[in-house]
Image: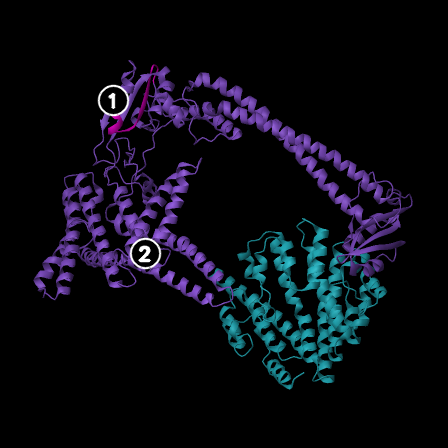
Chain colours: A cyan, B purple
Amino acid sequence: MSAYLLAMIRGKLSRMVNDADLDQLVGVEPDVIVQRLQTSSYAEALGEVWERPSDHLRQAFLDDIADLIHSLYEYERALLLDVLARYRVESLKIVIRAQLHRVPADEVKKHLFSLPWEDVDYHRLLEMPGLEAVIRELPWEEYRQRLDAVHRQVGDKRVAFPYESELDAIYLQQLIRQYQNGPMSARRILKYIVIKDLFSWAFRLKSYGRSFPELVNILPDFRPVIPQDEMRHIVEDNEGWHGMGRLLGTSLAGELERMDSFDLAALEKLFDRRIAEVIRESFVMYPFGMGVVLGYIFMKERELSRLIEVIERARRSERGGADVHH
Amino acid sequence: MFITDKMYKVNLFLPREDVTRFWDAVGRFGELQPTELRHVSRLEQYLSFIDLSELSAKLREAASFLGVDMAAPLDDSTVIPLPPDRLEAQVNDIYSELTDARARLQGLREAQRSVERELDKLTVQEAHLRLLEPLQVDIGALLHLRRFCVLAGTLPEDHLDQLDRSLHQFLHALLPYRSERHRLQLLVVCLNPDRERVNDILESALFRPLELPEELAGEPQQALLALAAKREDLLEQKRRLDDEFAKFEAWRGEQRARLSDFVKINTTVLTAHEQTGQTQAVAVAAGWVPKRELHRLRILVDTERNWVLETEEMSYEKTKDEDGNTVPSRLHNPALFRPFEGLVHLYGVPRYGGFDPTILFSISFVLMFGMMFGDLGHGFVLFLGGAGLLLWPRLRSGWRRTGKIFLMVGMASMVFGVLYGSFFGYEKIIPALWFHPINQINRILSYSIILGIVIIVLGIIINMGTKFIQRRYVELVFERFGALGLWFFLGALIAVYMNARGTSVSFVTILILMFLPLLLMPLEQPLKRFAARHKPHDKQAADNSGPLVTLLITGVDIFETMIVYLSNTISFVRVAAFALNHVALSIAIFQIGGMLRALPAGNVFYILMVAGGNLLILVLEGGVVAIQALRLEFYEFFSKFFEAEGTAFVPLKLKFKKGVMNAQS
């Protein structure tokens, strides 16, 4: 990885809004938030931030990350693109839902992100005549084949779930593949990102009444990151979730044990903390590795989601205040 | 010819029982437009109206089911409409017959759909059964085992391993036997009690079961033979249904031929009948008749002893009668110019008593088209196109009218082509009888401006004439396109001409020629208000604006008048521009063709280029020139005088085929 890229990331890291700053912004006036963000990478998006803030901030985030891609070597770039495929999957899900429910393209366009590293016109996909045409038009062979298989199965039924789960499966499958073959500096981070996503998804599917054998077919082949028996025990058995302690490390396992009942949101937060730990370790052990890039992206995503939360809260209180005033 | 036809409002009184016969006669007369008496409040308490909407709806429904072309002329002139009471009985009989026919048709369609569905299903089953062909076993027996459940289907290739893992807690076997287009064809074997749960798991693995016939027996090959026999049966059924359809269509054709005239004449007459008011013994009908046809109507009415005609001439000053009905405008032009009426109607229908510009429009449109698109060859193609449309059998009258327009613009194009010396873009094949526009650009520009001046002056004169006929004298003099407007325009032209000739023009001359009429124009509104004092009901003339606002509006109006005249005149430069454009396009095509000639087989490319280029000029430039000519007519000519507030005269007319009418007459 080039020294230039590392310097760039260090610079970007220094401009991030840390947790303490974010805590301070909770409940303050919108003007103060804007002032604080002037020195961040979101400065350019501030003008539009009060209209659909999450969309604009996410787009600013994507533009920020796009800078990194061109400075990477080819295999590193492939890894990063697999990680960023999450945004491709999100966009495709929006297109599929719009196509299935025949939502006018103009209503949906504003929610689609422009992915600077991809040469795909999602707006055009929205305007295609039917889902079959969309699938045929996808430039990625694997996506085409697998979505086509789903389409054959689903037929004319207007259900988005099978397509969405297949897209998620493709995304996680790629990450698992990268975990198996990628550089050491990135492997542990990837492993925990995959595990977190796998469990979130598996527990959600279980809550929809899916049995474990069905999950095996829906989820990607997870055995490289967790044995099938262990997965089955955790997901299928009523108290199996305690078994995740082994994956969370000693300190966080204690917190898991103290949980009275299963709480998916709390569990996801624990995994986020675990990933943050792994990133910190990776920064020390592999200061020039891909882990730095992945770590930056992970931290940036967390920053983004907290920022959106803060801004949304400020907007709501401003609107509420105005209503009271009137 | 130039003013819309003078109209008469007519009221007709006749015995109630004659109403149908009367409207039949009026339909054959074909020059009376009925008016609605139902909404005339002063007659409300005296007249009653029969509601014939249900009967009319039934007739239209019958026409729609039988596919009767209501716009087409009637075949038989001896057919007569029936009075409502007799008509109702007949229509009810026809309606019930058609209801049965509709049910029969629906039954046939459903049967056809059902057979098609069966055939589709069979196609899928055959395709799926072919997937099982490699298995030389009794499929029927295999799929109906007592203890084991065998499911045949397809699965995405890379799902096999996952499926195997997901089924690990069930006794199962996965038996893939072929792979095609990334999908495995396989048999899944499990125990019958596990069937339901295994099915859920299979579904989650995107397993797609084959659709196989219930009564499947023997090896796939045998089953396929059985399906082929079934297909034959279904095809036979389909053929029988097709025959039934053909018979039905033949029956429908017979009914159409039998009832077409009956439906058309009765629908037309019923529409008028509904508008006829009635007392206990007498029926009252009203309508509009052109003055030139009134005597024929009188003759028609006089043939019946009990029919009474009352007429009232409508003066051109009025556009509405005392009941608020708009007096329709009937254009009356010689046959040569009639095809252009449609183009005039694109702008609107002139108000009653307004000027009918069709003839002037036709002449100026053809002239401008010729000037802009002067080419002997291209004109000849347009001429041929027009002749083709005219001679083509069984074309609707709209196409024939278009053909006539093509014929005329084609001729104009040919004439100007000879004058310009242009033949399919070649400037040297025929000599120019007048001049080549590309060589004398200033000359063609001057001519187009002169043409523009003539058309604008003509527009103003027409406006003045119309206002005179309508007795709108204030507007005649003071309006922007009235006498003062003409004074200003001609004065400005004289001043420009004198200046161009080097004659010094004094300030007083300019003041008199140009600015005096402009300063007098604002008097229009005060004079109108003055005139309105004698008409206490004319509230529209009242104006409460302050002096400052009035002054401001006056200033803007004067400025606008100058701009309008200037821009209208300059607008005609486009006539020259398109004449030059035609030559320039042709030159460009020949130059490209010349470059292509240097290539191997260059002559072929040259011919293709020149032919394609000429076609492009013909279609694209021809279309643009037509639009531009139309634009000049509408914006620079019609805007001077055309008040498109009229409604077209639509008489009640029973149209008969030509031969039939001749025989009748």
Question: Disc 2: which chain?
Answer: B
Q: Which mark is residue B310?
A: 1
Image position of B586 with respect to B322: above or below:
below
Query: Could you say which is closer to the camera, residue A269 or residue A114?
Result: A114
Q: Single out the residue that lies furthest toward the bottom.
A: A3
Note whether residue A326 is visible: no
Image position of B434 with respect to B275: above or below:
below
Q: Amino acid at mark 2?
A: Ile
- Graded by Cα atoms within 10 Å as few (under 14), some (14 to 19) or many (20 or more), the crowding at tag 1 reads few
Picture coordinates of residue B526 (x, y %)? 15, 49
Image position of A22 with respect to B78: above or below:
below
- Graded by Cα atoms within 10 Å as few (under 14), some (14 to 19) or many (20 or more), the crowding at tag 2 reads some
Q: Is residue B168 left or right of residue B300?
A: right
Picture coordinates of residue B547 (x, y %)? 17, 55
Q: Is residue B294 magenta?
A: yes
User: In the rendered structure, which segment of residues is drawn in magenta?
Assistant: B279-295
Q: Single out the residue that lies furthest toward the right.
A: B147
The residue that disc 2 covers is B430
Q: Tell me whether the residue at label 2 lies in contact with that at label 1, contact meaning CB atoms closer than 8 angstroms.
A: no
